Amino acid sequence: MSYQIITTAESELTFYQNLDYLAKEWDDKVTDHFIDRVDNVIQKIKQNPFLFPLHGYQNNVRKAIIHKRIILYYRIIDDALIELLVFWNTARDPKDLKF
C-alpha cells in the first residue's frame, strides 16, 4: 500500500530554503543529490511510514534524516495520508522546532 503525501506551507518553504542555500553555496551536483535524497526518502515513507523513528515524545511525529544537517519531520494522518511538516536544518535552535 502506498500512502498519499501532502505538504504543509512550512515544509514547502523549508525545502526551498535549503535548496536555495545549496544552489548558492555549492554546485549543481550537491543540489541534485539533495533532491534525489529527498525523493528517495519520501518514496520510502510512502511505502512504509513507520520505517523512521518517532520524534521524542511528540505524538505521531516521525523524523527521517535527509542529510546530517537536514531532518524531515512528518506525521501519519490516517491509513492513507502522510503530512510533511518541515525540513529542519540542525544548525537552527531546537527550541524553535514546533509542530
Image (cartoon, rainbow, N blue to C red):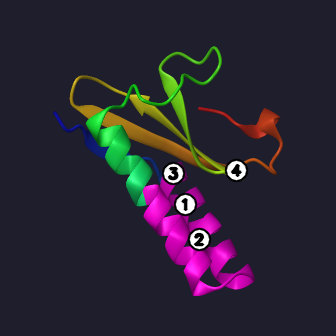
Whether residues under marks 3 and 1 lie with C-beta atoms below 8 angstroms apart, the answer is: yes
Q: Around disc 4, counting alpha carbons within 10 Å, would you say few (fewer than 14), some (14 to 19), or many (20 or more)?
A: few
Please tell me which of labels 3 and 4 falls first in the chain: 3
Q: In which quadrant will I find the N terminus?
A: top left
Q: Position of residue 90 (x, y in %)?
A: 75, 47
In the displayed structure image, the side of residue 46 where residue 7 appears, left or right: right
The residue at which mark 2 appears reads as 19
Q: Residue at x 30, y 45 (%)?
A: 5
* Secondary-structure class at tag 1: helix
Mark 1 or 4, closer to the camera? 4
Q: Nearer the viewer, residue 38 or 58?
A: 38
Mark 3 or 2, closer to the camera? 2
| Residue 99 in which image quadrant | top right
Please tell me which of labels 2 and 4 falls first in the chain: 2
Mark 3 or 4, closer to the camera? 4
Q: Which mark is residue 11?
A: 3
Q: In 3D space, how far apart are the residues under numbered discs 3 and 2 (Cα atoms)?
A: 12 Å
Q: Which mark is residue 68?
A: 4
Q: Position of residue 97 (x, y in %)?
A: 70, 37
The amino acid pointed to by label 1 is Phe
The amino acid pointed to by label 2 is Leu
